[in-house]
Amino acid sequence: MPINLVIAVTDGDWFDMLRHQPNLSEVNFWAPSAANFRALQPGELFLFKLHAPRNVIVGGGIFAYANALPCSLAWQAFREANGAQSAQEMRARIARYRKADTSDRSDFEIGCRILTQPFFFAEADWIPVPASWAPNIVSFKTYNTGDVDGLALWDAVHERLGRSDFPGVAEVPARFGEPQLIRPRLGQGAFRVLVTDTYNRRCAITQERTLPALEAAHIRPYGDGGEHEARNGLLLRRDIHSLFDAGYVTVTPELRFEVSRRIREEFDNGRHYYDLHGQPIFAPADALRRPDPGALRWHNEHAFRG
């Protein structure tokens, strides 16, 4: 089945920082505007091209997800995987691209293209752009493996991945065959963004929608065998997230919120939380993204204080 590939023009500072970072599991290829990105589906290839006159492809990643976020929250989710050393450096770079006034203190909303299993080629392996690449392209161009240029690009990328040491893309066979989707392995940042959007940017318990106050909670912690995936996540207000992780509240497999008696016993407090006891949570409409009952049972049995 033909699949798409994107070649995107890369911010030089972003590329130079990230290419030297070991063991990256994900990166945020951000755009200074919040325009929608629909060129790829999860599992397709997103490739990096240097600015002209260096018309070469120097690396890429597996496309996982795209959305728009305030730059402060993009920093919180991905930190240095945004290709900057600090939130201030990242914001200054965004402001430069947007040609914003230096006195503008806005929390710019930016486009986030989240890539997993990123790879950066050695200079000897850089790939010339296809002949169909136009010099006036400033953002990205989409190719398809059903076309000559797209298939040649797929083959060139996978030939390099097959003979080089890229443990992050282990799913790619050493000898490439038919073009195929590659399963993205989500990291912590991608998990946070995906869960935030899965719950329409509202707390699953209270419907609070002040975005800086919301956090993506793992139902079963990653360190205890949980995955970075939507079904293992809940979007919770920060205080409820803390109580959930500490076992003072839980969500049952029937998707009801429960509060432990230990809050009253230990803190002589918690009236606000007890007012929420027993109510159904606001679950995603998409059944494939609703909380995993098995993960909820794990939390009920192994984390909740009862």
Image (spheres, rainbow, N blue to C red):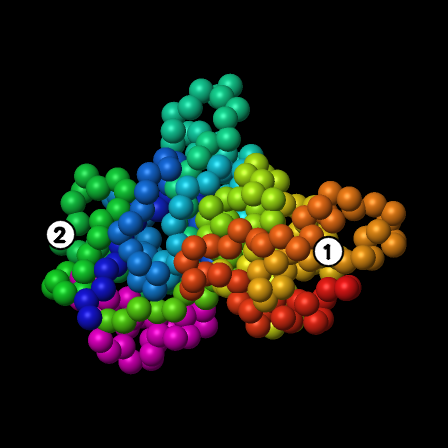
Q: Which amino acid lies under the numbered mark 2 shown in the image of this protein?
A: Ser
Find out whether residue 85 is within the magenta segment: no
Report the mark closest to the observer, 1 or 2: 1
- Quarter of image, res 280: bottom right
Query: Residue 182: which numbered mark, if any?
Result: none
Q: Is tag 1's residue or tag 2's residue first in the polypeptide sequence?
A: 2
- Quarter of image, res 120: bottom left
User: Looking at the image, which is closer to me, 255 or 151?
Assistant: 255
Q: Which amino acid lies under the numbered mark 1 shown in the image of this protein?
A: Val
* Image side of residue 287 versus residue 266, left or right: left
Do the residues bearing badges 1 and 2 touch, measured as CB atoms within 8 Å? no
Q: Look at the numbered disc 2 and give the secondary structure of its residue.
A: loop
- Quarter of image, res 182: bottom left
User: Looking at the image, which is closer to me, 15 or 151?
Assistant: 151
Q: How far from the left and from the top, in percent, is residue 236? A: 61, 49
Q: Is residue 27 visible?
A: no
Residue at 35% x, 46% y is 10
Number of dots carrying numbers: 2
Q: Quadrant of the N terminus?
A: bottom left
Residue at 70% x, 71% y is 301
Q: How far from the left and from the top, in percent, is residue 70? A: 48, 37
* Image side of residue 12 versus residue 92, left or right: left
Spatial CA distance of label 1 from label 2 is: 60 Å
* Magenta-highlighted residues: 150-178
Q: How far from the left and from the top, in percent, is residue 264? A: 84, 51
Mark 2: few/some/many CA within 10 Å (<14, 14-19, 20+): few
Query: Residue 132: which numbered mark, if any?
Result: 2
Query: Residue 259: which numbered mark, if any?
Result: 1
